């Protein structure tokens, strides 16, 4: 039985799997949990990340405002379902991830520059004052996701190098840093393999440490005659050498099927950005952007996901 290496989180959002449901990830029946109505002047709120904070939860949220500029705001919740979002923009950019390392909260996000997208890095202890570091990857990358602890004494970040457009360069790499300023030791992690992800893959939530290795949820993109379809997959990475993929599901775990995932500003999108976990029970709550319009929630257990990856492993 796979186990999470981490902290107890008794107040994790949770719903039991519906009777008769056969797949390893199931949706919250109150989806979507965050919409444009959560914040004045928002056109859409999606692709956002949350962490435990104090006796509740804090988050960083992508907001496309009514000018269609892309900004990031903070928010707070007691139950990680009902959120109060701040109306102060902390950074420009999109698709934030956040994790806690040694009592500090580290934000990574996509920054827009005249030369393309880069990965911004900042940290906070209180979600009010932020320290911004040098851009981690310049140019050009998206989907910068930090591991939640140092590995062999270094920070490690997953990235997807890209060009100034939207689709080329579809592989996940990682890089190392001793100080969050100078990054190097780049390693290839994985490429698209199966049809459901064939256009590109990108890291999703902060990797989850388990006794089997790092559990990585990621997004994969299919290009069809109707455009892009974003779905969620999963893999297990080596604990000490996380560029080594130990196992990887050959099929998606969650794909756009519900109306709020299929209809929106960008149809047919499931884009995971955060996961809350309880080490005692293995329960996992996954937050994902739905149709580039709202934030939705899904559930699994680490044991169920790991078992699915092994049963459908494309690595022979």
Image: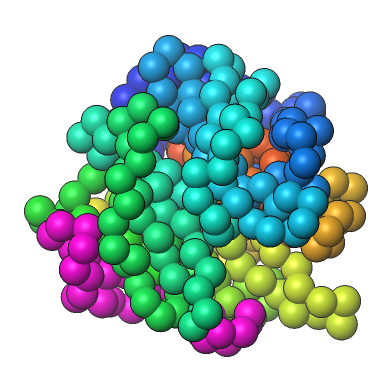
Comparing 143 with 210, the one in front is: 143
Range of magenta residues = 163-190
Comparing 288 with 49, the one in front is: 49
Give the farthest residue toward the left: 153
Comparing 289 with 76, the one in front is: 76
Above or below, 231 against 46 in this view is below
Determine if residue 27 is in view: no
Quadrant of residue 125 in the image?
top left
Q: Quick check: 229 left or right of 132? A: right
Q: Position of residue 69 (x, y in %)?
A: 68, 59
Q: Position of residue 149 (x, y in %)?
A: 23, 45
Residue 181 in magenta? Answer: yes
Q: Position of residue 152 (x, y in %)?
A: 11, 56
Residue 37 in magenta? Answer: no
State the quadrant of the N terminus.
top left
Above or below, 92 against 99 in this view is below
Q: Quick check: 40 left or right of 258? A: left
Above or below, 137 against 13 in this view is below
Comparing 6 with 194, the one in front is: 6
Quadrant of residue 156 in the image?
bottom left
Q: Please give the name of the residue rendered at 57% of the width and 20% of the height, measured from the top-left corner.
A: 77
Determine if residue 137 is in view: yes
Q: Please give the name of the residue rendered at 71% of the width and 75% of the height, measured from the top-left corner.
A: 222
Q: Position of residue 58 (x, y in %)?
A: 49, 28
State the quadrant of the C terminus.
bottom left
Image mark count: 0
Q: Quick check: 295 left or right of 145? A: right
Q: Please give the name of the residue rendered at 63% of the width and 80% of the height, measured from the top-left corner.
A: 166
Q: Please give the name of the residue rendered at 50% of the width and 50% of the height, measured from the top-left corner.
A: 91
Colour theme: rainbow
């Amino acid at each position: 039985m796979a186990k999470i290496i981490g902290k107890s989180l008794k107040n994790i959002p949770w719903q039991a799997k519906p009777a008769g449901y056969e797949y390893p990830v199931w949706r919250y029946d109150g989806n979507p949990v965050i919409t444009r109505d959560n914040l004045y002047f928002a056109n859409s709120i999606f692709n956002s990340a949350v962490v435990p904070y104090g006796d509740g939860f804090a988050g960083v949220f992508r907001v496309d405002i009514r000018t269609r500029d892309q900004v990031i705001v903070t928010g707070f919740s007691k139950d990680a379902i009902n959120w109060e979002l701040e109306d102060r923009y902390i950074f420009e950019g999109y698709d934030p991830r956040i994790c806690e390392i040694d009592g500090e909260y580290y934000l990574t996000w996509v920054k827009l520059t005249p030369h393309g997208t880069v990965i911004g890095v900042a940290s906070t202890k209180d979600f009010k004052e932020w320290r911004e570091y040098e851009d981690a990857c310049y140019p050009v990358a998206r989907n910068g996701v930090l591991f939640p602890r140092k590995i062999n004494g270094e920070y490690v970040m997953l990235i997807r190098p890209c060009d100034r457009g939207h689709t080329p360069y579809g592989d996940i790499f990682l890089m190392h840093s001793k100080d969050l300023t100078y990054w190097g030791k780049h390693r290839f992690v994985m490429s698209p393999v199966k049809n459901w992800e064939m256009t590109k893959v990108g890291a999703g939530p902060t990797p989850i440490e388990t006794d089997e290795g790092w559990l990585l949820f990621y997004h994969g993109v299919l290009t069809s005659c109707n455009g892009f379809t974003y779905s969620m997959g999963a893999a297990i990475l080596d604990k000490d050498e996380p560029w080594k993929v130990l196992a990887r599901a050959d099929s998606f775990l969650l794909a756009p099927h519900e109306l709020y995932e299929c209809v929106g500003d960008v149809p047919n999108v499931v884009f995971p950005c955060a996961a809350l976990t309880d080490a005692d029970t293995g329960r996992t709550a996954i937050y994902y952007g739905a149709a580039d319009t709202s934030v939705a929630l899904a559930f699994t257990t680490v044991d169920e996901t790991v078992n699915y990856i092994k049963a459908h492993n494309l690595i022979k």
